[in-house]
Amino acid sequence: MSKNIRNFSIIAHIDHGKSTLADRLLQLTGTISDRDMTEQVLDAMDLEREKGVTIKASAVRMQYTAQDGQTYELNLIDTPGHVDFGYEVSRAMEACEGAILVVDATQGIEAQTLANLYSALEADLEIIPVINKIDLPSAQPDVVAEDISSLLGTPPDEIIRISAKAGTNIPAVLDAVVQQVPPPKGDPEAPLRALIFDSHYDAYKGVIAYVRVVDGTIGATDTLHLMVTGSDVKPVEIGIFAPNMEPVRRLSVGEVGYVATGLKTVHECRVGDTVTQAKRPASEPLPGYQHPKPMVFAGIYPVEADNYGDLRDALEKLQLNDASLNYEPETSQALGFGFRAGFLGLFHMEIIQERIEREYGLDVLFTAPSVEYEVLLRNGETVLVDSPAELPDEGDIEEIREPWMNIEIFTPTDYYGPIMELVTKRRGSFIEQEYPAPHRVQLNYEIPLSELIVDFFDDLKSRTRGYASLDYHFAEYRPDDLVKLEILVNGEPVDALAAIVHREAAYHKGQRLITKLRKTIPRQLFEVAIQASAGGRVISRANVKALRKDVLAKCYGGDVSRKKKLLEKQKKGKKRMKMVGNVEIPQAAFMAVLKLDDD
């Protein structure tokens, strides 16, 4: 009975209590017994619990008997909690009819709250505002209720106030879901259309697709067709999440469940794809499918060259669960064999790095992240370049276009000045400002992505004492006066230290990088020259002094010419050593590119 089904998600800023509220709902509905209960039960990864942010979406079915005596089937679709996973959030929203908007009573509305709220409103969802953490001493539920009221128009006294940790007033949330979220619409007789809103890889059952049935029904024996990728699959099993996977005979209109496809890679079963029947296919897929596009690129190299094979296996296994991770082999003169990988953003890159190190026990070196540039050549051809080392010769380039982002910064009004200064310093331009709540301002800027990925978030947090929050979206590619900044160590270019920078900033960046490298590169038995070059000329140079042996120690007397002779002999040896000598560049040198603004 689809009229007794309610599909909803919980949206919130990081650390506002989304996963804790989900725990209380599961306990209250008896979906999980108190004995099996753990904190943040839907966040299965250690990393998710440590960072306080949901990385993988999940779904769970609950049975709830409401005040009217009827039993309702509630499907909670948990959404990822970080801006890098915006596309997955949008697909999870499409699978729902309602959303619980959780706002922290101590923090108030933040950037991610607004970003998720707007995507929920775009998906035409019924919004139920909830104020959490009312039991904390610093809570200001009345002030936050006024802010939410001015944003959504809900009267302040109708906004539900809860403490997810203490379990205060949780039944009111479930009653609101039953009363306010509309039941799913859909035609049970129409050809099958089911939206894949997430997927994960299982060693025994292949790719498990998380689906929401929009029209028609899925039977356990049906042959299914994926409309975007074109794959035909015979399901291994279909079922529901309660919260563990439980097989069922069929999934009908409005229901949320899973299809174990037996496919071997997530690439064949992408988030946003539409499942239909092979015998009686739907005429068109559900709207909104996109191919997740990597925005940040970095080289991944094993610290020990022997671990190259293990690193390749680790990336292959991670890609089984994460279709948005792209990688290909690359070699670097300085670092040897490794991989060039594309990520959705810096947080996604950090998660992958931690998972490689923890789950596979590998020591890896990530080079400084770069972005993808569009390069228009003089012959009219356009090429995409994601590694500074691949940039064509300057003489062949007509123009270089870099990606620009629209960013929204949400902050208390006291920090208006420091934020303005930060964004202007990084080539950003101001667009507009809004005041969604008293004492809070939303500042909208445009900024190059290359400026955003290097320490921008840390800088923003330190200037605003942690109060500002950030959300960003891709805007467009724009041409600018960009050049390749190369670092030469001992006359040899080090490809892993190259960067694409604005011509005006090349001199200062080159100089700061050389100063950093001079401190980082250990002294050798010969003098090492470190140079920065941009636009075909050397713009900065520093020497790492040689370690010298005191060859005059045994000359305690005699003519000065004896001393000169010994020093000349040493000089010749150093010169010869410099020709054959190899400078070891430590890992800290590659990270120095990221930390240029600390000085």
Image (cartoon, helix red, strand yellow):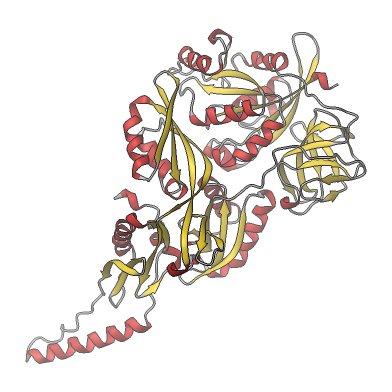
Q: State left or right for residue 586 relative to residue 314.
A: left
Q: Is residue 286 above or below residue 532?
A: above
Q: Residue at x 44, y 17 (%)?
A: 137
Residue 39 visible at all: yes
Judge whether 499 appears above or below 240 on screen: below
Query: In the image, 129: left or right of 247?
Result: left
Q: Position of residue 424 (x, y in %)?
A: 35, 41
Identify whether 295 is placed above or below 340: above
Q: Is residue 512 left or right of residue 150?
A: left
Residue 371, position in %: x, y? 50, 54
**Nearer the observer, 125 or 83:** 125
Residue 228 in picture, x, y percent from top left: 76, 47
Whether residue 522 is visible to the viewer of this picture, yes or no, is no
455 is higher (above) or lower (below) than 30: below
Q: How many marks?
A: 0
Q: Residue at x 69, y 52 (%)?
A: 320
Q: Nearer the viewer, residue 312 or 396?
A: 396
Left or right, 123 with reference to 411: right
Find residue 515 and report its image quarter. Answer: bottom left
Q: Of residues 406 and 38, which is closer to you in this image? A: 406
Quadrant, the N terminus: top right
- Residue 491, quarter of the rendered image: bottom left
On the image, which quarter does residue 210 sit in? Answer: top right
Identify the residue shown where x is 63% and y is 35%. 89
Q: Residue 174: x, y in percent?
A: 68, 17
Q: Residue at x 80, y 24 (%)?
A: 185
